[in-house]
């Protein structure tokens, strides 16, 4: 099997696994009363058995097909592999919307080589929307190619803003104030992966979050780049698991949003 064939097989499996994990999570979404909700760092940093079981679905499918691959998951942590490829998984990105009965959650899967993110899949089960990307081969939504419009500007689109317990409130508020002062408007739905996919689909003009873990953003960042947008790079190598600052935008939005967030 060639390298391209190997990645193509994993690309197909990532979509199948995301759909299977999404179906499992969706069943539990409709039976939320049965879930015991736990917290991590604060009251809004939630996890439930839905997160763990959805990640288990993905890990089991990948382990059977590609036992030599590594994992980096939000719930299950890191598991080294020998193939040079690592599956970076967030089984439910947007757990707070999920447990609150809101539709803004998704399954996010990235496949990382030693050089870059090779595959990105973001699946939104409620709308049955499958966002996909392969490095150098473009991005798509349900099989239809995505290309960000050159007419998208800061002033004629919404900008997604993310924040969590690692963010400095005054910094996030300052970004929102500067955005509005320049004629833009912020948007937040609780799922960074889904908002990044929305940038790729042209539904948002850009997205900013002071810090994201790789399982939350690698797939979405690849989607944006392959749809013709710009992003800040994620750390690589040993520092990948630590995550970092995320900025992604349509080409004509990038200069303004970069200046607002201190990257001009």
Image (cartoon, helix red, strand yellow):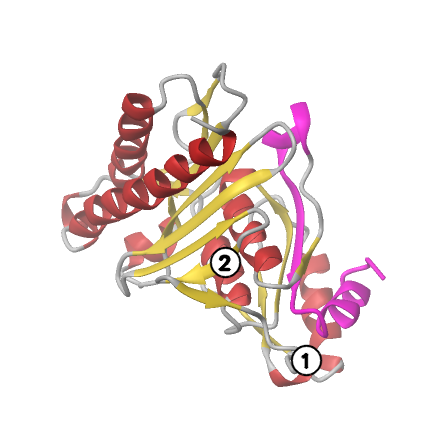
Q: Would residue 97 appear left or right of 119 to someone viewing this image?
A: left
Q: How many marks?
A: 2
Q: Do the residues labelled 2 and 1 touch (CB within 8 Å)?
A: no
Dot placed on the residue nearer the N-terminal end, 2 or 1: 2
Residue ID for mark 2: 139
Q: Residue at x 34, y 46 (%)?
A: 15
Mark nearer the viewer, 2 or 1? 2
Q: Is 18 drawn above or below residue 264 in the view shown? A: above
Q: Residues within 10 Å of mark 1 (few under 14, many from 20)?
A: many
Q: Name the side, left or right, on which 255 lies relative to 50.
A: right
Question: For the residues marked 2 and 1, what is the alpha-carbon distance in whole angstroms?
Answer: 21 Å
- Asked if residue 162 shows in the view, the reply is no
Q: In the image, what residue occupies the spot 76% across and 61% down? A: 261
**Residue 153 image label:** 1
x and y, in percent, of residue 148 in the image:
58, 71
Residue 108 locus on image (x, y percent): 42, 46
The range drawn in magenta is 236-264
Asked if residue 14 lies left or right of residue 164, the reply is left
Q: Is residue 249 on the magenta stretch?
A: yes
Q: Is 149 covered by the magenta stretch?
A: no
Residue 124 in sight in this render: yes
Q: Which residue is drawn at 41% across and 41% down?
A: 11
Q: What element carries label 2?
A: strand
Q: Residue at x 45, y 58 (%)?
A: 194
Task: Give whichever of 169, 192 is nearer the camera.
Answer: 192
Viewer-nearest residue: 231 or 256: 231
């Amino acid at each position: 099997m060639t390298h391209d064939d190997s990645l193509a097989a994993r690309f197909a499996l990532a979509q199948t696994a995301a759909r299977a994990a999404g179906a499992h999570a969706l069943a539990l979404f409709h039976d939320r009363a049965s879930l015991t909700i736990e917290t991590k760092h604060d009251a809004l940093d939630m996890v439930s058995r839905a997160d763990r079981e959805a990640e288990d679905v993905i890990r089991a499918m990948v382990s059977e097909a590609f036992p030599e691959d590594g994992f980096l998951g939000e719930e299950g942590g890191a598991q080294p592999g020998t193939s040079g490829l690592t599956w970076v998984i967030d089984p439910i990105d947007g757990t707070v919307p999920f447990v609150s009965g809101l539709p803004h959650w998704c399954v996010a899967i990235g496949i990382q080589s030693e050089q870059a993110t090779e595959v990105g899949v973001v699946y939104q089960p409620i709308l049955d929307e499958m966002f996909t990307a392969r490095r150098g081969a473009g991005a798509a939504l349900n099989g239809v190619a995505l290309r960000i419009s050159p007419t998208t500007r800061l002033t004629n689109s919404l900008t997604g803003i993310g924040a969590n317990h690692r963010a400095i409130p005054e910094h996030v508020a300052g970004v929102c104030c500067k955005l509005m002062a320049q004629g833009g408007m912020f948007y937040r739905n609780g799922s960074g992966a889904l908002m990044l996919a929305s940038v790729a689909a042209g539904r948002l003009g850009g997205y900013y979050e002071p810090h994201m873990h790789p399982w939350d953003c690698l797939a979405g960042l690849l989607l944006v780049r392959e749809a013709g947008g710009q992003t800040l790079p994620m750390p690589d190598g040993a520092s990948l698991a630590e995550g970092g600052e995320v900025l992604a935008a349509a080409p004509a939005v990038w200069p303004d949003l970069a200046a607002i967030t201190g990257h001009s």
